[in-house]
Image: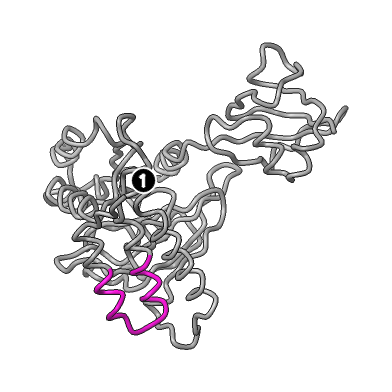
């Protein structure tokens, strides 16, 4: 079967061949993977690219990496969310306000030059937010797109004090050109054939205090509210609702464990994707738990508290499980 490689793939391949640093080569290889059609005709090539990425990663010269080209942020916490937006949207101020990160915050544009990770606490869950350089008139650098593709979700921040809809349109269209989609993949789309990487997204209208009549926020809500969750906020105000919306966007659930005859530990949940099963919860504790588990009891989503549940029992946020091995 012919590979039928796209113009985007050939462009990325050209950039790969021209790349000077190991990290840049890795980034362009990942770009080639991202835009490559997924079918049997590309299986061999896909495997070759993954091997090249692994080999380059193992032999990467850390001393040769610059502040930009070394910008691979390791995931931490329950999920990683990349925070993106145009200049002066206030995204760095939001990240600084709700995490332990200290990105550069100023009243002038383009103050953020590097990616800065920070941990956000929501109740008893930690979520990693990564502040990124602003999207301006110039195309985003390869390493920034790399961060976005690796992230579990996106926080798109726009400035409500000006034409927020134009900002949102420009960002969303640019990312779509890079084969980054939003929300869930359409049911009619075959994942094996599509090169598009779909991301959960929360669209944030910041500086709501400078949009007193709400017209700018209403514009983005009318355009994107049907497909994306939107929220208006102010980085200098109470951001509890924003933190809640970030958690809900990720479709995560918290499951608590207890020893037989004991009380559950409600401070340290197992964090799983929505629709995870009892077996998945056991595996997340340790692979041997799922293999050795004889039965389990569930409080919360069962028909009655403490009922015995099968391995395929779908858990819900707040469930308490008691595993018997």
Location of residue 71 (image quadrant): bottom left
Secondary structure under tag 1 reads strand
Q: Is residue 234 magenta?
A: no
Magenta-drawn stretch, dominant element (helix, strand or loop): helix
Q: Residue furthest bottom?
A: 63
Q: Is residue 322 above or below residue 137?
A: above
Q: Residue at x 36, y 71 (%)?
A: 104
Q: Is residue 302 above or below residue 12?
A: above
Q: Is residue 166 above or below residue 227?
A: below
Relative image position of residue 166 (x, y in whole percent): 12, 49
Q: Which residues are magenta?
A: 13-29
- Residue topped by disc 1: 199
User: Relative to residue 148, is residue 167 drawn left or right?
Assistant: left
Q: Nearer the viewer, residue 86 or 242?
A: 86
Relative image position of residue 239 (x, y in whole percent): 40, 45
Pick the quarter of the image with the C terminus. Answer: top right
Q: Is residue 24 magenta?
A: yes
Q: Residue at x 21, y 68 (%)?
A: 109
Q: Residue at x 44, y 49 (%)?
A: 152
Please state the total of marks drawn on the protein image: 1
User: Relative to residue 253, is residue 202 drawn left or right?
Assistant: left
Relative image position of residue 302 (x, y in whole percent): 67, 16
Using a 10 Å C-alpha cutoff, classify the residue at mark 1 as few (fewer than 14 neighbours), some (14 to 19) or many (20 or more): many
């Amino acid at each position: 079967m012919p590979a039928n490689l796209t113009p985007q793939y050939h462009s990325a391949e050209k950039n790969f061949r021209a790349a000077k640093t190991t990290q840049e080569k890795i980034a362009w290889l990942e770009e080639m993977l991202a835009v490559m059609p997924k079918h049997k005709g590309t299986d061999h090539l896909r495997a070759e690219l993954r091997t090249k990425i692994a080999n380059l990663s193992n032999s990467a010269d850390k001393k040769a990496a610059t502040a930009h080209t070394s910008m691979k942020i390791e995931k931490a916490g329950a999920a990683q969310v990349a925070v993106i937006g145009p200049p002066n949207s206030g995204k760095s101020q939001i990240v600084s306000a709700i995490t332990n990160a200290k990105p550069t915050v100023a009243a002038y544009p383009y103050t953020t030059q590097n990616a800065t990770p920070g941990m956000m606490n929501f109740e008893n869950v930690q979520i990693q937010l990564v502040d990124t350089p602003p999207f301006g008139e110039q195309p985003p650098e390869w390493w920034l797109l790399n961060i976005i593709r690796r992230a579990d979700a996106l926080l798109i921040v726009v400035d409500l004090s000006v034409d927020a809809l134009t900002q949102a349109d420009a960002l969303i269209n640019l990312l779509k050109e890079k084969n980054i989609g939003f929300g869930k993949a359409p049911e009619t789309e075959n994942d094996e054939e599509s090169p598009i990487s779909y991301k959960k997204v929360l669209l944030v209208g910041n500086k709501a205090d400078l949009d007193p009549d709400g017209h700018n926020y209403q514009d983005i809500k009318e355009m994107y509210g049907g497909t994306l969750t939107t929220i208006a906020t102010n980085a200098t105000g109470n951001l509890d609702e924003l933190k809640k919306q970030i958690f809900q966007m990720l479709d995560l659930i918290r499951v608590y464990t207890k020893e037989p005859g004991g009380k559950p530990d409600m401070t340290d949940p197992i964090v799983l994707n929505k629709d995870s099963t009892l077996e998945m919860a056991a595996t997340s504790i340790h692979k041997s738990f799922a293999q050795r588990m004889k039965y389990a009891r569930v409080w919360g989503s069962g028909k009655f508290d403490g009922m015995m549940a099968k391995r395929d029992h779908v858990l819900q946020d707040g469930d308490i499980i008691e595993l018997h091995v």
